Image: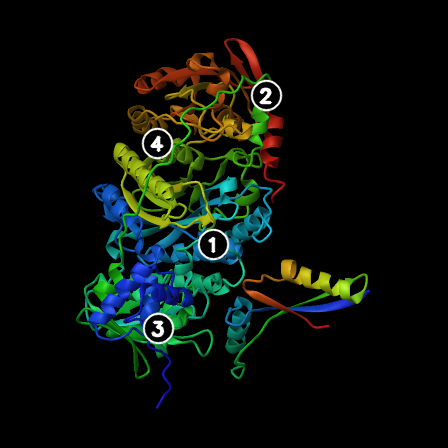
């Protein structure tokens, strides 16, 4: 059994409406010093079998299901 | 000294081949001939272009922006189709058509096919956002959305491309989330599945707005010294070269990220309020939406159509990210942006409104006398072009020839089990209930929708032919709207098939009791470099023109999407017709179901026994040959008498015969109430029962009439073929042919088959 932490982010240059909205609201609430906000998603998968095969599965899931390769990228954190 | 951000690109003296290579390397999608034209212009100016200039020209000359393959034919066939009530057609970003002395509706439809194929959710969402802004930029309050969608076979699952299932969920999700969040109802549309769209789904989005005619804001500015303002979303690297990409074939999914625009309805919603407030205060002199082509095409067209020039400072544009190059800023297709021309003395009033709604904006330049556009980034001049040259665009008359089409259609043996055939048709993905898709859209937000995509008793509603919007204006006029296409008929014969698309829309408007008022066409075709596709396009335009002339309806606006191809495979020719009709203040929208027992059922209009183009044959895998023309004079007579019959309360319900033929029309009419009918088709004309029940040609409408009104009905419809086929009642649809029962379909089974059809995709 192996555990994978997968982080999915918007690609550089792709605006994340959620982050934009958080930033805007922080400013409204008076947190003027905040200059940027990033929002990403983290998935944790437990996968059976050898580490090597499991990592391949994790990559396939990340590419095909957890992220949208056109606007997002993923990282396996470990 | 500051480092130069723009660079000069050497084109003078280069050969055609190396120019083509340059175009490919820079992602310009220009042909070698087009590059040669650019070379000629810059040789005459005695210099090489900058990267900003080359990118600007590539945008301006893309198929998407200048309609180079279709313009000649659109002008030839649509030019003199107008009526006195048309206020603005084919000129500005959207058409303006008068409803009465005071109010007009604004209407437009556009395709967003290529982006939706790559990134279905974002592509479809921005299609909706863009069409809303097209209507908004005329100064109108957007009041309703429609969308016509075309997908591959339901079970298609490509290796490299997205499966139909993924496309449906992404595209429908995008439309749902943008429309619902921005608070504009999606009231009408169509969904069609066919293997020719496996690699090329089509997303056509339309929008209607309401405006007082004297408040219309033109998409032009004709005075120098006005400030040019970009408001709304910021400019980023998303959507760069979107239009160039939309002007070539799709070749895979990865690496096209930058061509895709991403939407944010949370920015667009307050933008609509702010703009409308400014329109009411007459602050805005000229306005355009930033869509395909970005600032380059919006600013160029705004000033050029008013006959002035412009000076732009790109460093003043608000950016999503740092380090964007001047050419990227100039051609970016980031969403939710509007371009306004404002008198400098009114800038403080504008600022107040934008600040109130939390909208970002920046003054990026001003209009000047003359005919040139000059762009600076800081001190550096990055573009200096003649506007006639930049916005004129190209015009092609490409080769076209008609391929040999199948002439005749094989006639299959009569089915032994009509009940089974009817139930099978009802579960076909192109006929079955669209509720799984359409129910995701809010169709009543804003409170104008008095008839939506479904009608009937609550919880058992059946499909409606068109939707009706109460505008809340003093004259009490209502708007009726529909949109769709008949690709199978157009593929069989583009000239006649395209006329069927217009006729079907007219019959849908008529079935709600309305009178057809204007047409917006959205033409989706394959690659125009293929002579047979070009021929389809020309014949289709000719067909729409002919039909509109025969119905006396103006074509007020349109859109052409070409290169919907994958390798050598093209989509079926798909001219989508969005039609707007008007419903008199004294009329209630007509219903499309048997609302009570004991009503007489009539089939009105010409029957054609030819089964070509029918779903019945398609399901049997039989190729369709030539299709036959419907009867214009009879259909026009129906369009003339039905509104008055509706007003006098003579007609209880009606539904046009379309996909699936008469059998499907009758089945659908049982759904809204659960009331059946006992019908005799022997009297409807000569032909086999399968031809009478499943032919989709002709101009038939099923009408229900209360027995006490039958005499008045017959008198009013004296100019129309009529066949009285039976009465409503019971709990099943019984169909007899010369006395013999050939089908007996319980309504519970109709409902089950009909409602489950899309369940394997959604």
Q: Which colouring convention does the figure follow?
A: rainbow
**Marks 1 and 2: same chain?**
yes
Q: Is residue B339 visible?
A: no
**Marks 1 and 4: same chain?**
yes
Q: Which residue is mark 2?
A: B419
Could you tell which of marks 3 and 1 lies nearer the N-terminus?
3
Q: Position of residue B271 (x, y in %)?
A: 40, 64
Mark 2–mark 4 Cα distance, whole angstroms, equals 31 Å
Mark 3–mark 4 Cα distance, whole angstroms, equals 46 Å
Q: Which residue is depicted at the point 53% across and 13% down?
A: B736
Chain hosting mark 1 = B
Estimate how packed mark 3 is, as few (under 14), some (14 to 19) or many (20 or more) residues with alpha carbons within 10 Å: many
- Between circles 1 and 4, the one closer to the viewer is 1
Q: Considering only vertical position in the picture, is B520 above or below B285?
A: above
- Between circles 2 and 4, the one closer to the viewer is 4
Provide the secondary structure element on which disc 3 rests: helix
Q: Which residue is mark 4?
A: B496
Q: Position of residue B725 (x, y in %)?
A: 46, 15
Pick the front one: B336 or B473: B336
Estimate how packed mark 4 is, as few (under 14), some (14 to 19) or many (20 or more) residues with alpha carbons within 10 Å: many
């Amino acid at each position: 059994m192996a555990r994978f932490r997968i982080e999915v982010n918007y690609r550089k240059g792709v605006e994340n409406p959620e982050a934009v909205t958080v930033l805007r609201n922080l400013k409204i609430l008076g947190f003027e010093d905040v200059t940027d906000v990033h929002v990403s998603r983290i998935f944790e998968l437990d996968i059976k079998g050898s580490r090597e095969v499991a990592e391949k599965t994790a990559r396939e899931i990340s590419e095909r299901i957890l992220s949208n390769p056109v606007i997002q990228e993923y990282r396996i954190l470990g | 000294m500051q480092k130069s951000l723009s660079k000069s690109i050497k084109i003078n003296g280069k050969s055609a081949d190396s120019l083509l290579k340059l175009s490919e390397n820079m992602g310009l999608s220009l042909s070698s001939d087009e590059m040669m034209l650019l070379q000629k212009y810059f040789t005459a100016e005695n210099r090489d272009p900058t990267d900003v200039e080359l990118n600007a020209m590539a945008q301006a000359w893309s198929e998407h922006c200048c309609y180079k393959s279709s313009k000649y034919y659109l002008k030839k066939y649509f030019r003199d189709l107008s009526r006195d009530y048309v206020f603005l057609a084919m000129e500005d970003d959207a058409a303006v058509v008068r409803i009465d002395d005071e109010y007009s509706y604004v209407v437009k439809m556009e395709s967003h096919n290529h982006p939706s194929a790559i990134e279905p959710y974002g592509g479809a969402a921005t299609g909706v956002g863009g069409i809303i802004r097209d209507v908004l930029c005329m100064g109108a309050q957007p009041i309703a959305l429609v969308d016509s969608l075309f997908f591959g076979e339901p079970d298609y699952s490509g290796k490299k491309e997205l499966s139909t299932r993924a496309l449906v969920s992404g595209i429908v999700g995008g439309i749902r989330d943008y429309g619902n969040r921005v608070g504009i109802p999606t009231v009408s549309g169509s969904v069609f599945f066919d293997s020719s769209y496996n690699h090329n789904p089509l997303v056509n989005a339309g929008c209607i707005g309401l405006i007082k005619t004297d408040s219309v804001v033109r998409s032009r500015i004709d005075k120098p010294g006005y400030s040019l303002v970009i408001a709304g979303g910021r400019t980023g690297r998303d959507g760069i070269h979107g239009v160039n990409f939309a002007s070539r074939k799709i070749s895979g999914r990865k690496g096209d990220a930058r061509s895709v625009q991403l939407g944010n309805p949370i920015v667009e919603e307050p933008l609509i309020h702010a703009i409308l407030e400014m329109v009411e205060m007459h602050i805005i002199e000229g306005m355009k939406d930033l869509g395909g082509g970005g600032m380059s095409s919006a600013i160029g067209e705004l000033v050029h159509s008013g006959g002035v020039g412009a000076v732009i400072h790109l460093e003043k544009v608000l950016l999503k990210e740092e380090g964007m190059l001047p050419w990227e800023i100039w051609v970016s297709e980031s969403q939710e942006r509007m371009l306004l021309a404002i008198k400098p003395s009114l800038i403080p009033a504008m600022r107040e409104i934008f600040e109130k709604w939390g909208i970002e904006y920046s003054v990026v330049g001003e209009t000047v006398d003359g005919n040139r556009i000059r762009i600076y980034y800081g001190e550096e001049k990055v573009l200096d072009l003649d506007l006639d040259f930049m916005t004129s665009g190209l015009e092609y008359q490409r080769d076209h020839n008609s391929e040999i089409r199948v002439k005749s259609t094989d006639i299959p043996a009569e089915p032994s089990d009509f009940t089974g055939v009817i139930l099978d048709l009802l579960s076909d993905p192109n006929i079955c209930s669209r509720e799984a898709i359409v129910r995701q859209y809010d169709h009543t937000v804003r409170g104008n929708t008095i008839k939506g995509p479904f009608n009937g008793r609550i919880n058992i509603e059946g499909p409606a032919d068109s939707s009706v919007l109460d505008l809340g204006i003093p004259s009490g006029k209502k708007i009726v709207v529909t949109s769709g296409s008949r690709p199978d008929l157009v593929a069989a014969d583009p000239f006649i098939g395209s006329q069927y698309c217009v006729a079907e829309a007219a019959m849908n408007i008529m079935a709600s009791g309305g009178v057809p008022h204007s047409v917006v066409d959205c033409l989706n075709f394959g690659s125009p470099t293929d002579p047979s596709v070009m021929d389809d396009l020309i014949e289709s335009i000719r067909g729409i023109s002919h039909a509109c002339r025969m119905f006396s309806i103006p074509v007020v606006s349109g859109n052409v999407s070409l290169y919907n191809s994958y390798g050598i495979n093209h989509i079926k020719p798909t001219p989508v017709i969005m039609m707007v009709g008007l419903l008199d203040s004294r009329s209630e929208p007509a219903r499309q179901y048997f609302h009570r027992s004991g009503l007489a059922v009539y089939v009105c209009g010409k029957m054609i026994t030819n089964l070509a183009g029918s779903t019945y044959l398609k399901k049997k895998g039989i190729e369709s040959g030539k299709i036959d023309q419907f009867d214009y004079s009879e259909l026009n007579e129906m369009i003339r008498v039905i509104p008055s019959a509706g007003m006098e309360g003579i007609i209880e319900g009606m539904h046009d015969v379309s996909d699936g033929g008469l059998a499907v029309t009758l089945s659908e009419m049982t759904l809204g109430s659960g009331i059946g009918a006992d019908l005799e088709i022997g009297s409807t004309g000569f032909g086999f029962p399968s031809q009478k029940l499943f032919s989709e040609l002709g101009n038939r409408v099923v009408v229900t009439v209360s027995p006490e009104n039958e005499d008045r009905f017959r008198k009013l419809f004296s100019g129309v073929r009529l066949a009285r086929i039976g009465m409503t009642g019971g709990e099943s649809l019984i169909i007899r042919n010369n006395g013999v029962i050939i089908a007996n379909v319980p309504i519970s089974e109709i409902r089950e088959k009909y409602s489950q059809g899309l369940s394997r995709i959604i």
